[in-house]
Image: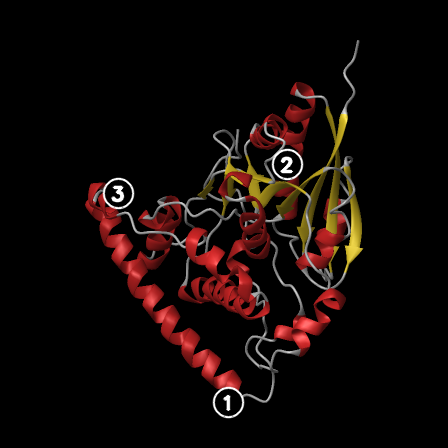
Amino acid sequence: MDRRRTPVTLAVTARDEASTIAPCLSSLLAAVELAEHRAPVDFDVIVVLDRCRDATGAIASTFDRVRTLDSTGGLVEAQRQVAHLTEIVMFSDADILVEPDTLLALLHAMERDPSLRVAYPPKTPLPPLRSTRLAHALHVYNRRQGFQTRRHWFSGKLFAIRGWSIPTREQLADRLARLPRDNFYDYHAGMRVDDIYLSRSILAEHGPDAIRCTDAGMLHFRPPETFEGMYRTYLRMRMEIERLDRMFPQTRAVHRRYGIRRHDPAARRAAPAGERRAFWWFQAALLACRLRYHLDRAYHRYWSPTPRDPWPPVHESKTDLWSDCDPPG
């Protein structure tokens, strides 16, 4: 007798990802095929187009198993359209590659432990395209996880979740009305990203065992390789953490306990000399990012007539995912 097959939604959120959507979908669909072959599941693969102005939608539509939806309002609103279609939903960025067993590993983790709220795969950076010292330093930092212990929040690049829940702008209206107008943080823009808020709220309610990185599978991504790309990545994360601190002050303690990586000096000392040098190059660039961040904040708070873009794109992630490397698997 055939076992009943469980529906699973795989949602790829995309905004102007024409250069990466095809290889991303190719790798995800290969993982879908393996997961459906080995587990009693049926995937519904959806690309949610967040105000795309390029050919992302047209390219996605060429894949037989993929359907597209249009969305406005950013990543969170794109996710909201599909978050409750099935009990388990997988969300993916449109600029990553996965190995064939990655989605199966997420499924196994969620099925084996009904108390698990989020499963996410390990990740590793693609080989750098530039040969500069900073590009090498950023690659080493991402490959070595910064020579730090792993924190307990998950990566928003790809994850499986049950019970996705992020408040709407209407639900936040009273809370936001009590916050000051700010040209830098723009509190009144509502929710911008998913993984930081979800990690905090899940950890606060369910504890660290509710979020788990899988032992199998792998996600490949292209990190920034220039100072501008590094700063934009730093800016997005830092702004969102500080916005959440003001919007949801009750989650600060959770962030301090679970969301901060701790340095691992022993791992750094054991690394090759070239990687140790790369680490100090990264630290110097990070110090420059912090200085620029404070100057940026002061300018937009006290002198700029227009608000800071609260979510500037990191263009370096939107480059050829298969350059100088073989497709996963």
**What whole-number distance in Å separates the C-alpha atoms at marks 1 and 3?**
43 Å
Q: Which residue is mark 3?
A: 267
User: Above or below — where is 120 with respect to 287?
Assistant: above
Kind of residue at disc 2: Leu
> Seen in the image, is 299 located left or right of residue 149?
right
Q: Quadrant of residue 292?
A: bottom left
Q: Is residue 131 visible?
A: no
Q: Which residue is mark 1?
A: 302
Query: Foreground: 243 or 311?
Result: 243
The local secondary structure at tag 2 comes to helix
x, y percentage for residue 327?
53, 35
Of circles 1 and 2, the one toward us is: 1
User: Above or below — where is 296 with respect to 247?
Assistant: below
Of circles 3 and 2, the one toward us is: 3
The local secondary structure at tag 1 comes to helix
> Seen in the image, is 294 located left or right of residue 302?
left
Which residue is rendered at x = 41% and y = 77% of the image?
Answer: 294
The mark nearer the N terminus, 3 or 2, is 2
Q: Is residue 42 visible?
A: yes
x, y percentage for residue 232?
49, 66
User: Above or below — where is 174 with respect to 33?
Assistant: below
The local secondary structure at tag 3 comes to helix
Tell me if mark 2 has few (under 14), some (14-19) or many (20+) residues whose alpha carbon lies within 10 angstroms of its own. Answer: many
Contact, CB < 8 Å: mark 1 with mark 2? Answer: no
> Seen in the image, is 232 located left or right of residue 181?
left
Kind of residue at disc 1: Tyr
**What whole-number distance in Å separates the C-alpha atoms at marks 3 and 2?**
33 Å
x, y percentage for residue 150?
40, 45
Q: Which residue is mark 2?
A: 28
The mark nearer the N terminus, 1 or 2, is 2
x, y percentage for residue 76?
68, 57
